[in-house]
Amino acid sequence: MASEAHSIVEVLGQTQRRALRERGTEVRFPEGQVIFWEGQPSRSVLVIEHGHVKVTQRAADGAEVILAVRGPGEVMGDEGVLMGEVRSATVTTITEVSGVDIAAEALLAFIAEEQLWPVMYKAAVWRRRESDQQSLLARLGVKNRLARWLLELAAEFGTPKEGDCVLDVPISQYDLANRIGASRDAVAIALRQLRQQGLVSTGRRQITLHDLEGLRRLTL
């Protein structure tokens, strides 16, 4: 997991988590469903308890760009609520997702009561750093960009298995291409090169990383 907390839920005690959960409504979404649309009013947030989502934005040319993949414990839609702005991105499920939907007013009241504004500021800084990293990432080649994001996914969702690291989140070549700003053909070629180097292996919606150090060398 990442070394610093970037979600409200990560820093709450069990009593606080229960209190926050009680202010919301349990919800479930099937795979492939849009939860929030970019440009939509920010009327609530979603605390993910099970499953994964992708966060996307539309580029100037209309292409979909993946900003991140999020999973259990993440709070989605909080920036728009806190700033009183519309949704800055679209959130779509990539697996079945269950969680708690919390109205904007209820979240703001909870943050004020629990004095969590410093945590929210830290989360905003973390996300800005993440956006800045994407600008730097764009200067690397496709294989290098791909290696870097695979390492990010491993840190967030990887499961050790017999010396390897299995990504516990279904990512398609389409998602990979959108995330690193490349064509699907370019990603397919890069994946083939990584397989030939013995760094990864791929299956249906599953990627296994065999050599994390080798992947890190590609990002330097």
Image: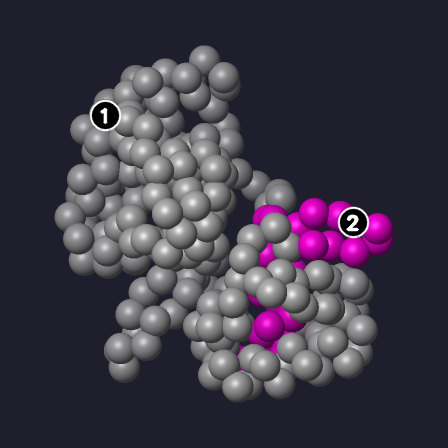
How are the residues colored?
Answer: one colour
Tell me: 78 left or right of 192.
left
The residue at the point 18 percent across, 40 percent down is 43
Residue type, label 1: Ala
The crowd level at tag 1 (other Cα within 10 Å; few <14, some 14-19, many 20+) is some
What percent of the width, then of the height, locates residue 41? 15, 48
* Residue type beneath disc 2: Lys
Residue for badge 1: 106
Instruction: Give the quarter of the figure containing the C terminus.
Output: bottom right
Q: Residue at position x 36%, y 22% from top? A: 21
Drawn side of residue 214 relative to residue 64, left or right:
right
Q: Is residue 13 visible?
A: yes
Q: Nearer the viewer, residue 30 or 54?
A: 30
Residue to which mark 2 is pinned:
161
* Percent position of residue 190, x then y: 63, 81
**Residue 2 vs residue 23, the one in the foreground:** 23
Whichever of labels 1 and 2 marks the residue nearer the N terminus, that label is 1
Q: What element carries label 2?
A: strand
Give the image location of residue 3, x and y in percent.
Answer: 62, 43
Residue extending farthest to the top is 15
* Image position of 86 with respect to 141: above or below: above
Q: Which quadrant of the view contains residue 76?
A: top left
Residue at image coords 24%, 46%: 80
| Residue 121, x across and y down, in percent | 38, 40
Q: Give the range drawn in magenta.
A: 139-166
Vertically, is 106 above or below 88?
above
Query: In what element is the residue under mark 1?
Result: helix
Nearest the viewer among 174 and 61 is 174
